Amino acid sequence: PTTKDFLSGAVAGAIAMTATQPLDTVRVRLQQKQIGRPVGMLSMLGTTLRTEGVLSLWKGMAAPLVFCSLQTAILYQSYSAVLRLQASASGDVHQIPSVGQGFVAGCVAGFAQVWIWSPVEMVKVRMQLMKSAAPGVPWAVPIG
């Protein structure tokens, strides 16, 4: 069961990262916009597409894609492991977990995965804000 949890988390993480990266890139750029004329999400999206192309929406995704898969895999596996541990401690492995047990399992799983995700998120944001590839850093460009 733990391999299944781990692989399920890895696939889920990769799909989630790929699907949400374009909006995340626009969000990060909106947050970094200098004070001046107000710019909305669609305006920022249009500007990014016009000046940098479609693949720029996935800029900075290469390294986080690997780590997001790992992070989500750890999240799924940790959550399941804690639930199994709680079930074996109660003596009824077929019992549906209570809200409290789910809460504890979620807290432990979140604590386990945050150590991977926080540094990766910082790298991802810095790469999203780059207007062009950094010299000598081949992984800091859009996938494609």
Image: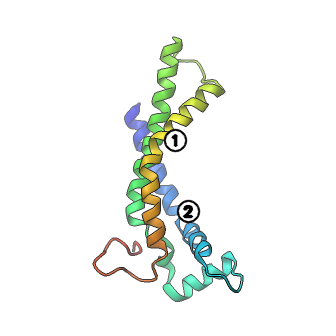
Residue lying farthest to the left in this orientation: 136
Single out the mark in the foreground, 2 or 1: 1
Indicate the position of residue 99 as horizontal and vertical percent values: 65, 28
Label 2 close to label 1 by CB (< 8 Å): no
Q: Residue at x 48, y 24 (%)?
A: 84
Left or right of 57, for residue 70: left
Q: Residue at x 54, y 18 (%)?
A: 94
Does 85 appear above or below 52? above
Where is residue 7, by image quadrant?
A: top left
Residue 46: in sight, yes or no? yes
Q: Nearer the viewer, residue 70 or 10?
A: 70
Residue lying farthest to the top in this orientation: 91
Q: Which amino acid lies under the numbered mark 1 shown in the image of this protein?
A: Gly
Where is residue 132, by image quadrant?
A: bottom left
Q: Which amino acid lies under the numbered mark 2 shown in the image of this protein?
A: Thr
Left or right of 100, for residue 141: left
Indicate the position of residue 114 as horizontal and vertical percent values: 47, 47
Quadrant where the C terminus is found in the figure: bottom left
Q: Residue at x 31, y 81 (%)?
A: 135
Q: Which residue is mark 2?
A: 20
Helix, strand or loop status at disc 2: helix
Quadrant where the N terminus is found in the figure: top left
The disc, 2 or 1, on the residue closer to the chain's N-terminal end is 2
Q: Which mark is residue 110?
A: 1
Residues packed near mark 2 inside 10 Å, few (<14), some (14 to 19) or many (20 plus): few
